[in-house]
Amino acid sequence: MTEQDRFAAFRHLSFRRYFVSRFGAAFGAQILSVSVAYQIYEETGSAALLGWIGLVQFLPALLLVVVTGVTADRVGRRLVMGLSIGLEMVCALGILVLAALGAFDPVLVLGILTLFGVARAFLSPASSSLAVNIVPPEDFANAVGWTASSWQLASIAGPALGGVIYWLSPLTAYGSACLAFAISAGLIFSIPKPEQRRSSEPTTLSTLLGGFSYVWKEKVVFGAISLDLFAVLLGGAVALMPIYALDILELGSVGNGLLRAAPGIGAIIMVLVLTSFPIRDHAGIILFVSVALFGAATAVFGASTIAWVSILALMLVGGFDMVSVMIREVLLQLWTPDEVRGRVNAVNSIFLGASNELGEARAGFMAARLGAVITVVGGGVAAMGVAALWAGLFPKLRAARHLDHAERD
């Protein structure tokens, strides 16, 4: 692959702005997330509250799924994305004010994070669907890899810098998140209005549920996103990073940032590998193997009491997860008609939210009862089991070979 092919999506100005905006929004969210979780655990010592942080951000996406998808399909995706990031900025500003006034009450913070979850519920399907409208089809697979890497870059820089900034001052950390959201929203609104195919059918219950119908019908897509759902739901350990940083590895707030950044480092390395050597064949088998290795690396992290082993294991977690992310996203976006893409991405966001935020809630609540080590190690083993079970339940996904075209019957 030539250097030009590797960066094909960046030939388009709108994609460059979109990429930086996605990075900025994810960067701000990571700083906010790592700072809020650390401050709450530092002040309360409650693993259950770490679980609530994930739960209140997931519920809005679940409750609003039929609205957010239709909004992305019927309203301009650029507009929805920009306004959603603007609402995230308002939420970060609210937490900044609470911290400045010395009123950092967990109940008030969770209330603001619920509103933050509403913003993310609208942002996810709109931002995922917008990418298709700003690059030509021949460059979209390349764009998917780089779009995913923007989030992973933020997953490195956000927690690492967030941990250092929080150590200097919590107010500076929350203020930095506000600034990142503001820049991100401005960049999105600077993108020329792209063409978007809109369905002319009236809004009915069938229309609202169109994303669910499509995902259920396309078993390869359903298998791919449900595999990610259960693997990360059971194997996710992000919510418990403050426990590992403070109580197990004794690394402090800066170390907490490094632990949160480690999966992103592994993911970025994998992005560079996959954009240089794209998956040409046996995509289904590669997907299942990567999910199984994700679970194994998670179990190693959960059992480790040595900092460098823990960080290396987390890098492997991020790397193997990135393989499944890229395969799933290419399948989802290229196989979905544009007029229902927002609704399908809304469904996908529910699966992602369940795997991430709901997974954080599961981990926090389980750790409060069983301890962090048992929770993480057991989750990693369970993720390996999910990979094996799904390989048997979805033979078409296992047999999928190529990502550059839909292998439908």
Image (tube, rainbow, N blue to C red):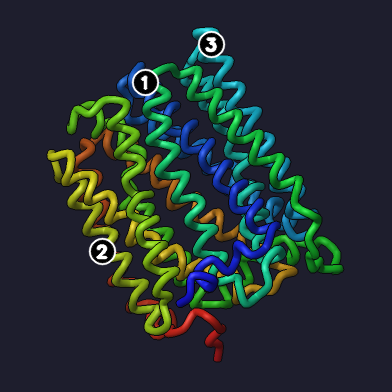
Viewer-side label of 1, 2:
1
Q: Taking 209 as reference, is 55 above or below it?
A: above
Q: Are marks 3 and 1 in contact (CB under 8 Å)?
A: no
Amino acid under disc 2:
Leu
Kind of element beneath mark 3: helix
Which mark is first along the chain, 1 or 3? 3
Q: Which residue lies most toward the front here?
A: 3
Q: Which residue is mark 2?
A: 293
Which mark is first along the chain, 3 or 2? 3
Viewer-side label of 3, 1:
1
Measured in 3D between alpha carbons, the distance from the residue under mark 2 to the one under mark 3, in whole angstroms, is: 43 Å
Tell me, for residue 191, which label it has, or none: none
* Spot occupied by residue 126 in the image (x, y as percentages of width and height): 67, 54
Tell me, for residue 167, which label it has, or none: 1
For the C terminus, the image quarter is: bottom right
Tell me, for residue 100, which label it has, or none: 3
For the N terminus, the image quarter is: bottom left
Amino acid under disc 3:
Ala
Measured in 3D between alpha carbons, the distance from the residue under mark 3 to the one under mark 1, in whole angstroms, is: 15 Å
Q: Nearer the viewer, residue 355 or 204?
A: 355
Residue 198: name its quadrant. Answer: bottom right
